[in-house]
Image: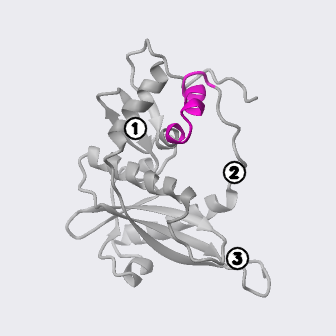
Amino acid sequence: MPPIRRRNKFDPTSTEPFKLSRSKLELFLDCPRCFYLDRRLGVGRVSSPPYTLNAATDTLLKKEFDQHRAAGTPHPLMVEHGIDAVPFQHPDIDRWRHNFTGVQYLHGPTNLLVFGAVDDVWQTPNSELIVVDYKSTCTQKAITLDDPWRQAYKRQMEVYQWLLRQNGFDVSNTGYFVYVNADVGKDGFHQRMEFTPTLLSHTGSTGWIEAALVAALDCLAK
């Protein structure tokens, strides 16, 4: 059994905002009982092994897109897919991408300080923002967002869209997943691994979020 956590537990008698991450909201949607044990009692799920290769590709993709952010130019993948945008330059971009800060918004009806760390944000010529998420995989099948377990990815993007809108930004309903797929069809490793990028679009719908936050608070307050 995981050790009982003493910090970051919901106190129904407190008037202070309670921080709720995007991933913990997803935990509530997946398993309200697990969510209660975690955020109210301090008993978290047993964590899975870290995906270090995924973290590495995430870091490298950010560095690559940051080069175009600094130059104010579109990434070749954006040009290839006809996306008229450039990586968004904003003084808080690093804060938005940090796991423990992210994009934040205090939801007044619940007093929940909702936050989530976005991978990237692009901006169109009319100042509309596009939420972007990086994903890594290794498969010989066509990559789609139709798999049941990838529905959580869609909700992840929708929370980011909602958070940016609550911060006063004009955000497109269409977001993109930059998927990089490891190529295992080579004749050997040769001290390198090559990835093929795929761009998948998702039209987000954020209408479910308000009700989910109210339900999550009701779960915690029991």
Task: Describe residue 142's horizontal placement relative to residue 214 as left or right.
Answer: right
Q: Nearer the viewer, mark 1 or mark 2?
A: 1
Residue 57 x %, y %: 60, 65
Q: Is residue 170 above or below residue 40?
A: below
Q: Are marks 1 and 2 in contact (CB under 8 Å)?
A: no
Question: What residue is drawn where x is 52% and y is 45%?
Answer: 99
Q: Which residue is mark 2?
A: 50
Question: Any mark on residue 10, and which?
Answer: none
Q: Is residue 168 above or below residue 122?
A: above
Q: Quadrant of the N terminus?
A: top right
Question: Any mark on residue 193, and which?
Answer: 3
Q: Quadrant of residue 114?
A: top left
Seen from the viewer's position, the closer of residues 68 and 159 is: 159
Q: Main secondary structure of the magenta part?
A: helix
Identify the element where label 2 is drawn. Answer: loop
Identify the element where label 1 is drawn. Answer: helix
Sort mark 2 into few (<14), some (14-19) or many (20+) by Cα contacts within 10 Å.
few
How far apart marks 2 and 3 lie (CA) works out to 19 Å
Q: Which residue is mark 1?
A: 212
The amino acid marked with disc number 3 is Met
How far apart marks 1 and 2 lie (CA) works out to 28 Å
Residue 172 x %, y %: 28, 61
What colour-coding does the image apply? one colour
Q: Quadrant of residue 45?
A: top right
Task: Describe residue 62's horizontal placement relative to residue 192 as left or right.
Answer: left
Sort mark 1 into few (<14), some (14-19) or many (20+) by Cα contacts within 10 Å.
some
State the extent of the magenta-drawn residues as a range: 27-42
Q: Nearer the viewer, mark 3 or mark 1?
A: 1
The amino acid marked with disc number 1 is Ala
